[in-house]
Image (cartoon, rainbow, N blue to C red):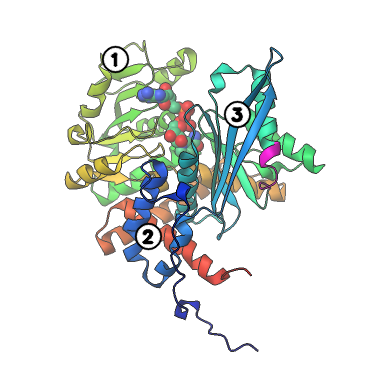
C-alpha cells in the first residue's frame, strides 16, 4: 500500500505560469469578463483555490477550417471552433452558434459559462461551446447543410456521446442537430443519437425541451419572488425577446396571473398597462415574425422599454443589453436573465447598488441544459418519458439549485451571480482535486 497523503489539499499549490497570449488576463472581450468573474470568486474557494488556474485555461481548443462548395460552384471557407473548457465533472456540453460575430474569445467564454451553469444545476457535465463565424441567412439550405456536416466532421475528433455533446444555440435548431447527428453517425458507422441534444422528437429528442429554458426562467422567478415577498400573480412583467425563451417565460407568467405589460423584440416595443393578451401575441409573432404591428398595444420607442413601470424584467434576447447607460433607469425589483450575458459588469454594480435583485444567466436559463441532460439519459436508455415527468423533474432541479445558491448568497452577503459561481466552481474544483493530475 502506498503511504502517500490521502488528502491532496495538503499538497503545495500548483505554480501559476503566465497565460498564453490568447488567454491574456487583460483581454477585454467576453473571456476577459469571465476571468474577472473568477477573480471575484477566488477568495471564497478555501483550499480549492489552489486549483483555480484550471478555470482560467480551457482544457482544449479546436479551430477548424470549414470549406464547402457554394451553389454557384465556387468554394467558401468558414472558421469554426469547438472549445472544451472543463471536463472534470463529465463530458463537455454546450451549444453551437452560427453568427457573423463569433470569435474565439466569445466561444471560450461561453464554454466556461457552460461549465459554471452545468455545475450550478449539478448535471454531470463539463462545459463546452462551438461556433462558426458565418451569417447563416446568406446561405441556401443546401449550403447550410454542407457547412454543418463538414464542421461536424472536423470537430468529430473531439465530440461524442461520452466526450462532448453539442446542442442548439443562436441560429442553430433541431434540423441542424439532426444533420450533426447523422454526420457523426455516418462517420462512426452506427446511429449515435446521444451525440447531440435538442434533436427533433422523432429522432431521439425530448418532449418539453423547446419550452425548458423559459420554464426554468419562470421557476426560479417564482422561487425568488417568495424570498422577497413579491406576489407573482400581481406582478407586472416586461420581456425583451419573445422567441423560444422570452415567449415561453412570458406565457407562463401570464398563466400565473401576472400582467405582461411590455414586450420588445427586433421588430419594436409594445406596451399595455392593463397587460398584453399573451396567447394572441404569441400567435401574432408566429404569423408575422415579430411583435411589430400587434393591435391592442401602444408602440414605444425602443429605448423607453428600459424604463417601463414593472416588477420583473426578463432580458431574453441578446448579450450586453443592460449597460451603464440604462441600468439606472430600470424600475423592476427583479431581473431574470433568460439570455446569456445580457448584463455588463458595470451595469451589475449599478443594479446591486440600487437593490435590484438579479437572477443570473448561469442559473436562470439553465432549464435548457437540464432537459438536454434528460434527453441524453433517455437516448442512452432508449426509453422516453412523458412530458409531465420531464417538467416535474425540471422544476425540482431548478428549485433545489436555486435554494442552495440563495443560501450561499445570504451566508456570504454576495450577489446571486457570485453565489452561483461559488457553488459551481467549488463543485468543479472538488472533482479536479479528487481526480488528481494525469499522469
Ligand atoms: P430566439 O431566436 O428564439 O429569440 C430571440 C428573440 O430576440 C426574438 O424575439 C428576437 O426578435 C429578439 N431580438 C433579436 N434582436 C433583437 C434586438 N436587437 N432587440 C430586441 N430583441 C431582439 O432565441 P432564444 O432561443 O429565445 O434565445 C434568446 C437568448 O437566450 C440567447 O441569448 C440565448 O443564448 C439564450 N439561451 C437560450 C436557450 C435556449 O434553450 N433556447 C438556453 C439558454 C440561453
Tell me which label, 3 or 2, sits earlier in the chain: 3
Residue 367 in percent (x, y) is at: 48, 44
Residue 91 in percent (x, y) is at: 61, 53
Spatial separation of the CA atoms under disc 1 and disc 2: 43 Å
Label 3 CA crowd tier, 10 Å (few <14, some 14–19, many 20+): some
Label 2 CA crowd tier, 10 Å (few <14, some 14–19, many 20+): many
Residue 439 left/right relative to 355: right
Residue 426 in percent (x, y) is at: 43, 64
In the rendered image, residue 288 lying in the magenta stretch gets the answer: no
Picture disc at residue 422: 2
Residue at (34, 44) in percent of width and height = 222
Q: Which residues are magenta?
A: 153-160
Residue 308 image-quadrant placement: top left
Residue 241 image-quadrant placement: top left
Q: Secondary structure at mark 3?
A: strand
Give whichever of 403, 305 is nearer the camera: 305
Residue 7 in percent (x, y) is at: 50, 80
Residue at (69, 25) in percent of width and height = 68
Q: Which residue is mark 3?
A: 78
Give whichever of 183, 32 is nearer the camera: 32
Residue at (67, 53) in percent of width and height = 162
Give whichever of 222, 171 is nearer the camera: 171
Amino acid at each position: 500500500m502506498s503511504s502517500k497523503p490521502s488528502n491532496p489539499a495538503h499538497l503545495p499549490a500548483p505554480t501559476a505560469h503566465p497565460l498564453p497570449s490568447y488567454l491574456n488576463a487583460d483581454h477585454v472581450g467576453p473571456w476577459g469578463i469571465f476571468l474577472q468573474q473568477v477573480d471575484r470568486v477566488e477568495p471564497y474557494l478555501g483550499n480549492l483555490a489552489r486549483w483555480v488556474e484550471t478555470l482560467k485555461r480551457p482544457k482544449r481548443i479546436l479551430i477548424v477550417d470549414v470549406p464547402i462548395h457554394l451553389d454557384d460552384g465556387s468554394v467558401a471557407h468558414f472558421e469554426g471552433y469547438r472549445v472544451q473548457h472543463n471536463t472534470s465533472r463529465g463530458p463537455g456540453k454546450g451549444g453551437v452558434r452560427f453568427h457573423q460575430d463569433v470569435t474565439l474569445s466569445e466561444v471560450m467564454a461561453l464554454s466556461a459559462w457552460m461549465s459554471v451553469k452545468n455545475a450550478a444545476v449539478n448535471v454531470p457535465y463539463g462545459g463546452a461551446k462551438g461556433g462558426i463565424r458565418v451569417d447563416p441567412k446568406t446561405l441556401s439550405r443546401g449550403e447550410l447543410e454542407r457547412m454543418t456536416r463538414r464542421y461536424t466532421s472536423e470537430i468529430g475528433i473531439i465530440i461524442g456521446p461520452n466526450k462532448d455533446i453539442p446542442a442548439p444555440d443562436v441560429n442553430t435548431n433541431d434540423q441542424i442537430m439532426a444533420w450533426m447527428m447523422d454526420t457523426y453517425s455516418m462517420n462512426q458507422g452506427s446511429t449515435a443519437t446521444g451525440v447531440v441534444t435538442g434533436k427533433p422528437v422523432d429522432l431521439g429528442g425530448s418532449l418539453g425541451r423547446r419550452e425548458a429554458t423559459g420554464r426554468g426562467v419562470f421557476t426560479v422567478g417564482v422561487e425568488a419572488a417568495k424570498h422577497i415577498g413579491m406576489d407573482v400573480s400581481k406582478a407586472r412583467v416586461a420581456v425583451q425577446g419573445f422567441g423560444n425563451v422570452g415567449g415561453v417565460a412570458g406565457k407562463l407568467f401570464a398563466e400565473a396571473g401576472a400582467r405582461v405589460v411590455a414586450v420588445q423584440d427586433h421588430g419594436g416595443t409594445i406596451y399595455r398597462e392593463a397587460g398584453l393578451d399573451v396567447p394572441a401575441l404569441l400567435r401574432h409573432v408566429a404569423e408575422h415574425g415579430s411583435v411589430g404591428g400587434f393591435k391592442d398595444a401602444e408602440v414605444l420607442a425602443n429605448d423607453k422599454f428600459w424604463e417601463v413601470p414593472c416588477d420583473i424584467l426578463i432580458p431574453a434576447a441578446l448579450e450586453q443589453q443592460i449597460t451603464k447607460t440604462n441600468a439606472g433607469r430600470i424600475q423592476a425589483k427583479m431581473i431574470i436573465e433568460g439570455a446569456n450575458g445580457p448584463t455588463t459588469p458595470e451595469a451589475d454594480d449599478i443594479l446591486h447598488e440600487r437593490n435590484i435583485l438579479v437572477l443570473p444567466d448561469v442559473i436562470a436559463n439553465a432549464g435548457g441544459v437540464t432537459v438536454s441532460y434528460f434527453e441524453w439519459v433517455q437516448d442512452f436508455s432508449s426509453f422516453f418519458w412523458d412530458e409531465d415527468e420531464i417538467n416535474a423533474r425540471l422544476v425540482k432541479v431548478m428549485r433545489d439549485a436555486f435554494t442552495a445558491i440563495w443560501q450561499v448568497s445570504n451566508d456570504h452577503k454576495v450577489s446571486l451571480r457570485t453565489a452561483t459561481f461559488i457553488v459551481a466552481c467549488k463543485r468543479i474544483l472538488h472533482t479536479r482535486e479528487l481526480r488528481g493530475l494525469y499522469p
